[in-house]
Structure formats: C-alpha cells, structure tokens
Image (cartoon, rainbow, N blue to C red):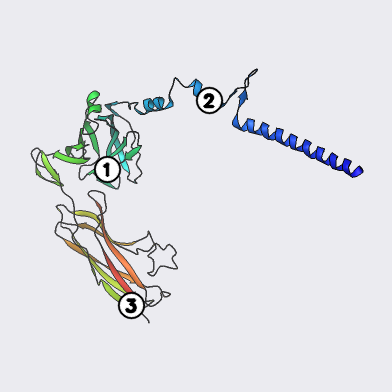
Amino acid sequence: MRRQLVHLGVVIAVGAVAVVLMASLDKEASRSSGAVALPGTESVVTPSAERDSIVAHQPVDAVRDEAEVTPFPEHPGEFGNYGCLSPSREQRKPHTNSWKAAGYRGEQYRSVVVCAGGYEPQPRTGLFVSAQSFGWAGYQRFPRAYVPWSGPVTITDAPLGEEGSAHAWDAHLGFEGTRGVTGYLDLADFKVYVTGGPVEGVCPFGTYGTPPECHLSYAKFGRLRAKPLRQATSPGRTVTYKVKINNVGRIRAEKVKLCVSNPSNELDELKVPIEGLIYGQPLCKKIGKVRIGETKSRVFHLKVNDWVKPGKKVHLVFQAISTAPVGEPDGKQVQTTLKIRHR
C-alpha cells in the first residue's frame, strides 16, 4: 500500500512539471512569433500582418523605384576656388583657378571640376587636374594633363551658366600660361591643344606646326642599351655595366637620370643579392640634359654580397627617367641577368 502511494505521488509530480513546462514553451513561442490576441476574440494578429495592412496603399517597390529615378541636380558652369583632391602624388603649385559644372549627356550624368595651376617639380610646366564623378555608380576619375614650357596655366574662357551644364562632357576650356602659351583643354578626351604663343604667327617653344595648330613636342628615349646583358661573377666581386640612352624626340630632355633596381620584393638589407639595392630604393646616376639626337652613357659598379649562394640568378633592371618637360617618367627599361658562380 505504501509503495503504491509513493508511485502515485511521483506520477502526480511528474505530470505537474510537464504542465508547467508546456505552459512556459507556449509563452515563449507566442513571444517569438509576436502574436497578439485581441480582447474578446480568438483571432490573432501578427506584427507582419499589421504592417502589411498599414502599408498596403504604399507599395515598397513603387517607393523604391521612385527614389531610384530621382535625377541628379544639374550645376551651372562657374568659376570658383574649388579643390581637386586626387589620389595621385601630383603637386599642383601654384593653384590659379577652377571651373565646375554638372549635367547630362542623354541619360548619363557627370559632375566635373577642373583645377589649373603649375607642376611644382617642373616650374615651366602647366598642369590641369580634374575630379569627375558619374551617377549612382559612384565611379570617379582623376585625369591629368600637362602643358610643357607654358609655366603655370590659368583658365581664361569656359562655358558658364546653363551652357556649362550642357557641355559638362565636351567643353573647351581656354587657358593662358605665364610664358605666353595659349590654347584650350578638351574635356571630351582631356587633352591639351596649343593654339599660339608670345610671338604672333609662330608656335611657342616646345611645339611645332603653324598657329592655331601647334602640336606638343615631347622628349622621347630610343632603345635603352646595357652591356653586358649576361655575365657571371663570384660572391664578393664587383661587376660593371655600361648603359646608353639617346633622345629621338622633338625636344631636349631635362633632368634625365639612369637608375638600376632589383625587381625582387626583398626589403631586408641582409638578404638582397646586390649591395644597396633594397626594394623601392634604386641606385641612380644623374645625366642632366639630353639634346635632340644626342646619346649619353653612364657606368655602374655593383658589388655582389658575400653570402649569395653559387648558382643563383640575379635580375637587374636599368631604367631611364626624365622629369621634364611633361613631368612623367619615361618607361624605357632593359633587364640584365647576373649568374653567381663558385669562387
């Protein structure tokens, strides 16, 4: 009899615990689903159903489509002290003036700011820098254009008002340099066209042709030659290279230098095969001016580090660089191979 009572009590206790657990689970389920029972009824309204009933007369897709077709504001052409922040390291100094406009070409939108001034590393070179953005995509461009031998340039003529917004894609911006060079910048291809100079009827220095069609002249390097292209040496020895460069352009090249670098990405000075050739720190020799048709050369003496293992091949890249008149380095280069042999 006593055992039966004990079993009955256990069964009753287990049943009570089960009931409590079921009630708590029902409560949690109702909280997670967000169901709300209306007073005096058995129906349940969920938040999602309530939201759908509220915004039924305002379709979300329609509102989103309406926002996407909202046009960008057109901006009339005007001069101002605008900035042209560029991710490049170009230094525009001094800054003379700026022009801004924004408009459409068909369904394509563009906002453009053009800043004029000088190129600090080469004071006799004018420089245009532009900041351009295109529509919803957020695409941006930062093109540059140089005007050699003009000095710092100033925008003197540009479309203003509604005409500026109508020609935000293809405007011609007239300019004048401090050395008397005149011309225009074509926004369609962002190229400079020189139309005259300080002497009437004569194209200015650094150009050729007859006004108003004066073509820019650039220094141009011919084939870069390095001798020998292949050689072998032992660790601790010094090798010699002779590098030649010639100017085949229409104008003399200035501030020319010949540099040698190791294309490996090694930054540790104790691991580079050639003494002093750390990645990003080429060894350069100055040449100066190279006139039209002239050839100049420099000799490099490079020492191989003592620890380099025999059988290793070291690649050396020689490059010609000129900072004038356009301010951009020329890409002429030649690669040589140095094989390390046993002592």
Q: Secondary structure at mark 2?
A: helix
The disc placed on residue 144 is: 1
Q: Mark 2, mark 3: which one is toward the viewer?
A: 2
* Quarter where residue 92 is shown: top left
Left or right of 209? Residue 32 is right
Report helix, strand or loop for mark 3: strand
Q: Amino acid at mark 1?
A: Arg
> Label 1: few (<14), some or many (≥20) within 10 Å?
some
Name, please, the residue furthest toward the top.
40
Sequence order check, earlier mark of 1 and 3:
1
Residues under labels 1 and 2: Cα distance? 57 Å
Write the residue at 92% across / 43% down: 2
Residue 188 pos. (x, y %) = 21, 37
Q: Residue at x 36, y 29 (%)?
A: 68
Determine which residue is flagged by label 3.
233
206 shown above or below 153: below
Percent across and percent down for residue 26 are: 67, 32
